[in-house]
Image (spheres, rainbow, N blue to C red):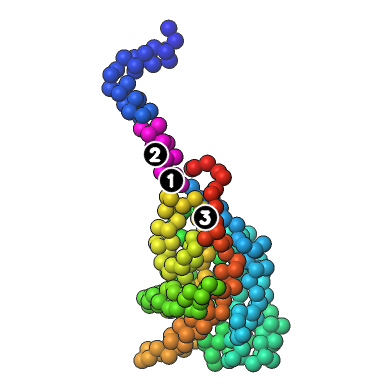
Amino acid sequence: MNPWKQAARNLLAQPAFVVVAVLLGVSAITLNSAVGYLKLHFKKLAVPLAVHSLKEGLPEQFGDHWIQISHDQPLDPSTEEVLATHEYVFRDYADRRLISADEVEQLRQASGNEYAQLMGDHERRHPQAIIRAAVTYYTGMVDTVAHVPERCYVADGYESKGYDDYSKTIGNYPDGHPRDLSFRFISFEDQTGSQRVSRNVGYLFHVNGEYKCDSLAVRAKLQDLTESYGYYAKVELMTQMPRLIDSDNIVRDQSINAMTDFLGAALPEIEKCLPDWKALHEKKPESKVH
């Protein structure tokens, strides 16, 4: 007799094996039935942006005052692979209330070392006058939110001085409702001994139609098994802090106020690039339950 057939007969002759096999089969059928009945989604459908790309969708100027002074440059392939998305914008914006039109034009025309030197000069005089903004978009994922300042800056040799979550009403949505949200603010100091300038960083997320400032809250939102779709966009802002003031928080407060002002101008434009979650949520996905 074929040894494989004999082995199969021996297993089937054992009541414990038969019971376990039956239970596993019933469990699989029951689980699939429950998933289908409850309409649970262990995988998320990707959601395209409302625009062709963030680079094309986001304007060079936010509101009346914040104007782009840097040039859009693609990341090198290895960096883009680590970032894990092709949808990103990294730009520097200047506040025209603090930097003159001539100085703005000079920055826009500069590049390389000249640009870095001009930026350093302006940031020493007005740390809140220039905001380095990063907008990144992810969709179809339910994993952890990997790229947050608490990890990235520490890995780069900075130390966090603690964080605060600020709740703000930043303008109104198109329907007139107030845009109530929170953003996380962190100060980082260089720990490498190379005397790099300290930095203030603020960030928040727009995930499945809502604002969050905590990566764990983003993950929980994405892991909602009743939702078919999943996306999030991270908005991260940074200002240089060329002087540390231990006795007061002047520079810190200036950064928070500048970021709040910037968000008030930028978020309506960013939201235009993101999916219409209400319309998407009301749409019945054609694909089968995952």
Which residue is outermost to the top? Answer: 1
Mark 2 lies on residue: 34
* Residue 31 within the segment the image draws in magenta: yes
Q: Predominant secondary structure in magenta?
A: helix
Hey, which quadrant is residue 218 in on the image?
bottom left
Q: Which residue is mark 1?
A: 40
Against 155, residue 100 (above or below) is below
Secondary element type, mark 3: helix
Return the residue at label 3.
Answer: 282
The circle drawn on residue 210 is none
Q: CA distance from mark 3 to mark 1?
A: 16 Å
For the residue labelled by badge 1, is the local secondary structure a helix, a strand or a loop? loop
Give the CA distance from mark 1 to mark 2.
Answer: 8 Å
Residue 279 in percent (x, y) is at 55, 59
Q: Are marks 1 and 2 in contact (CB under 8 Å)?
A: yes
Image coords of residue 149 (percent x, y)? 46, 70
Q: CA distance from mark 3 to mark 2?
A: 23 Å
Image depth: mark 3 or mark 1 in front: 3
Q: Residue at x 57, y 84 (%)?
A: 130
Q: Amino acid at mark 2?
A: Ala
Mark 3: amino acid? Glu
Q: Residue furthest front?
A: 175
Q: State which tag comes first along the sequence, 1 or 2.
A: 2
The answer to whether 3 appears left or right of 283 in the picture is: left
- Please state the extent of the stretch shown in magenta in the rendering: 27-42
Q: Residue at x 49, y 81 (%)?
A: 260
Q: Residues within 10 Å of mark 1 (few under 14, many from 20)?
A: some
